[in-house]
Image (cartoon, rainbow, N blue to C red):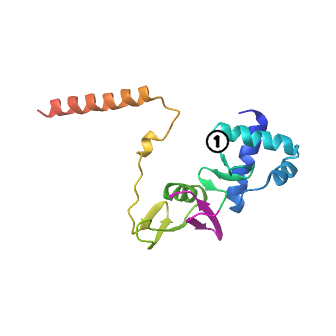
Amino acid sequence: MNPIERLVRAHVITSLRETGAATSVAQMADSLEIPQADVTAALRSLAGQHRLVLRPGSDAIWMVHPFSGVETDFVVHAKGRTWYANCVWDGLSILGLVGDGRLETHSPQTGEPIRLDVEDSRVAGHAIVHFLVPAKRINLARPRAALRRERGARRLSAVRSAETRW
């Protein structure tokens, strides 16, 4: 990322965190005191780098993890504010950033309302949440070879531990 892209990305995330809404290109340009063309170029570059997602056919923010720039079925409430997330994981991530609150959504199978409350960093509620990828494998910066070495080291450690018990 170049300096303008960093500045624009930070502004997008800060504005979503503070207001729950994405700002327009014109608002960003005014706030950052840079030309709208530079903001647009930065947004498009960031989208190309998969650092945020623009609404199809526009330069409007659709999402930047964990925030959604549009209303969704995953509604987060905390400190008198409302945010939107793209999934339960993102909703809980928002609460991890802003503090205690609640995530409201519904069952995709039955339509029944689901409410997850977070208090003192603990999640409470009645729902089954399925994460397809274990959290420890989400960090895409770690190469797969490193993950294989770690798994191999854990297996070897488990074998040695079992041998010492015998």
Q: Residue at x 43, y 41 (%)?
A: 136
The percent position of residue 166, horizontal first and vertical second, equals 11, 32
The percent position of residue 39, horizontal first and vertical second, equals 81, 43
For this orientation, the residue located farthest to the front is 57
The percent position of residue 144, horizontal first and vertical second, equals 43, 29
User: In this rendering, would 87 be left or right of 16?
Assistant: left
- Which residue, given by chain and number where applicable, does mark 1 sit on? 51
Compared to residue 152, the image places residue 52 above or below, namely below
Which residue occupies the foreground of this view, 37 or 148?
37
For this orientation, the residue located farthest to the left is 166
Q: Residue at x 71, y 60 (%)?
A: 21
Residue extent of the magenta highlight: 71-87
Quadrant of residue 67 in the image? Answer: bottom right
Disc 1 is placed on an element classified as loop
Q: Residue at x 75, y 32 (%)?
A: 2
Q: Residue at x 67, y 41 (%)?
A: 47
Compared to residue 103, the image places residue 15 above or below, namely above
Quadrant of residue 95 in the image? Answer: bottom right
Compared to residue 89, the image places residue 9 above or below, namely above
Work out which quarter of the rendered image holds the N terminus and state it: top right
Which residue occupies the foreground of this view, 25 or 7?
25
Q: Amino acid at mark 1?
A: Arg
Which residue occupies the foreground of this view, 87 or 141?
87
State the count of labels.
1
User: In this rendering, would 154 be left or right of 97?
Assistant: left
The percent position of residue 146, horizontal first and vertical second, equals 43, 27
In magenta segment, residue 23: no
Which residue occupies the foreground of this view, 157 or 131?
131
